[in-house]
Image (spheres, rainbow, N blue to C red):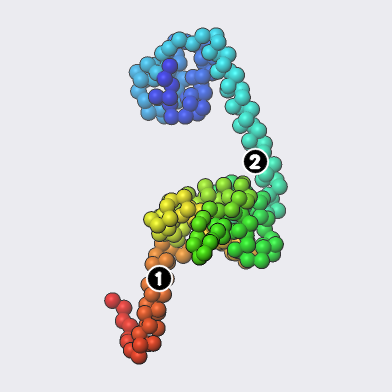
Amino acid sequence: MKLTRVVTDILGASGRAILAALIAGETDPERLADCTDVRVKASRADIVAAVHGRVTAHHRFLLQLHLTQIDALRAAVENVERQADEVLLPFREAADRLTTMPGVSETVARVIVAEIGVDMSRFPTAGHLVSWAGLCPRLDESAGKRRSTRIRHANPWLKTALIQAAWAAARKNGSYLQSQFRRLKGRRGPKKAIVAVAASMLTAAYYMLRDDKDYHELGGRYLDDRDKHRITQRLLRRLHDLGVEVEVKAA
């Protein structure tokens, strides 16, 4: 049988219906095809061909065993999520605020609140929090040469959640975080760039929680505009030092 050829999610409604029929002893491909939902895009002929095969009593036993385990795990996950929602209730406003940041899902917001809390007075600065989370490079220099930029080993749950969120944020078109990732990827590689994005996200989370404010999107052109102004001012100061005064006009 090649059920995955015609059903996208084998544990979806159609897939589970076919598996239940197989466990019950049904072997007729036509009757098995009747179990599929009308929304399945595959043709009936393809479905019939996909469910045509030999299923023994041993196969049915294993199918039932695996499905029972899957259902038990799903129920356990749902139970944990309900418990997490109850524990998070006093901090719901803070968690919802964090989800205004690109890439931060409800699950990631839960992890952030669970790992660092909502009282940022424990961390003197955002940099202390980023360091505690293990998202800043270690200082490893000798004779003025940097030998390593590996990040510190620290809170694995927070770091993992933020890295996953950073990948999602890097796909948000027109965002500051996407712009930051693209800038750093070229010279530092995607892995180090995404860690830098995660550090920026945790920095933003620090100020959002400290000041009770939603995420402020700077936009994809923020870095370009900032650097343009900075370079212009540096060159103007250099010209001034040389005794030259110029008038700047926008192109």
Q: Is residue 176 above or below residue 70?
A: below
- For the residues labelled 1 and 2, the Cα–Cα distance comes to 44 Å
In which quarter of the view is residue 241 placed? bottom left
Whether residue 13 is situated above or below residue 142 in the rendered picture: above
Q: Quadrant of residue 126?
A: bottom right
| Label 2 secondary element | helix
Name the kind of residue labelled 2 in the image: Glu
Q: Would you place residue 8 above or below residue 204 in this image? A: above
Q: Which mark is residue 227?
A: 1
Tell me what residue is drawn at x 51 percent, y 14 percent.
22
Tell me: 221 left or right of 249: right
Say which label, 1 or 2, has the lower sequence index: 2
Residue density around tag 2, few if under 14, some if 14–19, many if 20 or more, within 10 Å: few
- Under mark 1, the amino acid is Asp
Image quadrant in which the C terminus is located: bottom left
Q: Nearer the viewer, mark 1 or mark 2?
A: 1
- x%, y% of residue 209? 63, 61
Can the viewer see residue 189? yes
Quarter of the view holding residue 230:
bottom left
* Residue depicted at 41% across the width and 27% down the height: 40
- Does residue 212 appear in the picture of this structure? no
Does 238 appear above or below 4? below
Label 1 element class: helix
Residue highlighted by disc 2:
81
Residue drawn at (45%, 10%) of the image: 54
- Residue 199: percent from left, percent from top: 54, 57
Residue 114 location, x and y as percent? 66, 50
